[in-house]
Image: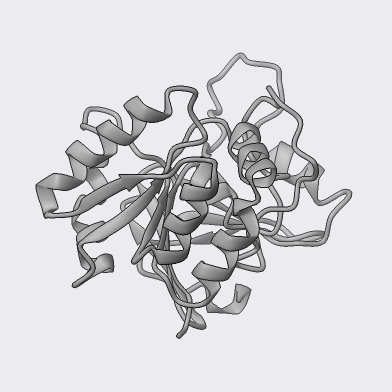
């Protein structure tokens, strides 16, 4: 089966509730699948996080089971009809998946065609590495290698530079150009309210705000919603 991915930049838009902006897309993406396994490891309160997701997805008829970092969790992933990895701290998420032995199982299931949804940190780990996360390294994973479900890096919550800002730190664009001083892999900066949907060898931008493509030695390229990302696959 071809891979099926829905990689959302953020779980909450300004002025909206949790997953409001992406709920209809999640429903359409899952189709007849009405049960999923939720990966809560990016937040400390895993039980509370799972309950929040379960309550929200109940509105579209989705039954949620929350993953645990043990043998029972491994069996849950192996039997999952779909998987959703939530946002939070990307370093904590990746370390937990590595330490529990779940990372490779999750990768194998997603590459075998089990629908994979991610938001924020859950989208970060769909890339080859987490080197383009925005998060603070509050823990140290064994490596930065992630799921590698797509061959490009992702920067969720991408922010365009504000020409009127007095902040003297680096802009997001400058940070990603810095990444390309040391790395070749293209980066997709997806703005809040946007997502990437992958069906086999086809990738499309969705949502409201589009993305910015960064390549080493080239000027950034704008991609609008509903445009293809097939060239990056």
Q: Dividing the image into 4 quarters, which one contains the N terminus?
A: bottom left
Q: Give the residue at x 62% y 32%.
A: 92
Q: Position of residue 151 (x, y in %)?
A: 66, 68
Q: Is residue 207 left or right of residue 146?
A: left
Q: Give the farthest residue toward the front.
A: 71
| Image position of 20 (left or right of 194) | left
Q: Nearer the viewer, residue 176 or 29?
A: 29
| Residue 7 visible in the current orientation | no
> In this picture, is 11 found above or below 15?
below
Camera-side residue: 131 or 102? Answer: 102
**Horizontal and vertical percent position of residue 121:** 53, 41
Extreme residue in the right direction? 182
Q: Is residue 96 left or right of residue 144?
A: left
Looking at the image, which residue is at 51% across and 77% down?
112
Q: Can residue 191 be seen in this snapshot?
A: yes
How many numbered marks have been drawn onto this rendered protein structure?
A: 0
Q: Quadrant of the C terminus?
A: bottom right
Along the line of sight, which residue is nearer the eye, 222 or 61? Answer: 61
Question: Is 215 drawn above or below residue 66 in the view shown?
Answer: below
**Residue at the spot x=47%, y=83% of the render?**
2
């Amino acid at each position: 089966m071809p891979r099926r991915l829905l990689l959302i930049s953020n779980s909450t838009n300004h002025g909206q509730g949790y997953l409001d902006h992406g709920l209809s897309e999640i429903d359409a993406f899952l189709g007849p699948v009405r049960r999923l396994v939720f990966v809560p490891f990016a937040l400390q309160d895993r039980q509370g996080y799972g309950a929040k997701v379960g309550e929200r997805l109940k509105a579209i008829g989705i039954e949620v089971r929350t993953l645990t970092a043990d043998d029972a969790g491994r069996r849950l992933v192996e039997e999952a009809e779909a998987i959703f990895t939530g946002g939070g701290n990307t370093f904590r998420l990746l370390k937990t998946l590595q330490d529990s032995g779940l990372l490779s199982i999750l990768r194998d299931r997603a590459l075998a065609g089990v629908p994979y949804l991610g938001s924020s940190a859950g989208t970060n780990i769909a890339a080859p590495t987490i080197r383009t996360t925005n998060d603070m390294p509050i823990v140290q994973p064994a490596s930065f290698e992630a799921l590698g479900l797509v061959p490009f890096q992702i920067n969720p919550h991408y922010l365009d530079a504000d020409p009127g800002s007095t902040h003297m730190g680096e802009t997001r664009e400058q940070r990603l150009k810095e990444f390309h001083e040391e790395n070749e892999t293209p980066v997709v900066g997806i703005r809040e309210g946007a997502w990437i949907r992958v069906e086999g060898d086809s990738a499309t931008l969705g949502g409201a705000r589009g993305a910015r493509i960064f390549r080493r030695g080239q000027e950034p390229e704008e991609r609008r919603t509903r445009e293809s990302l097939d060239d990056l696959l």
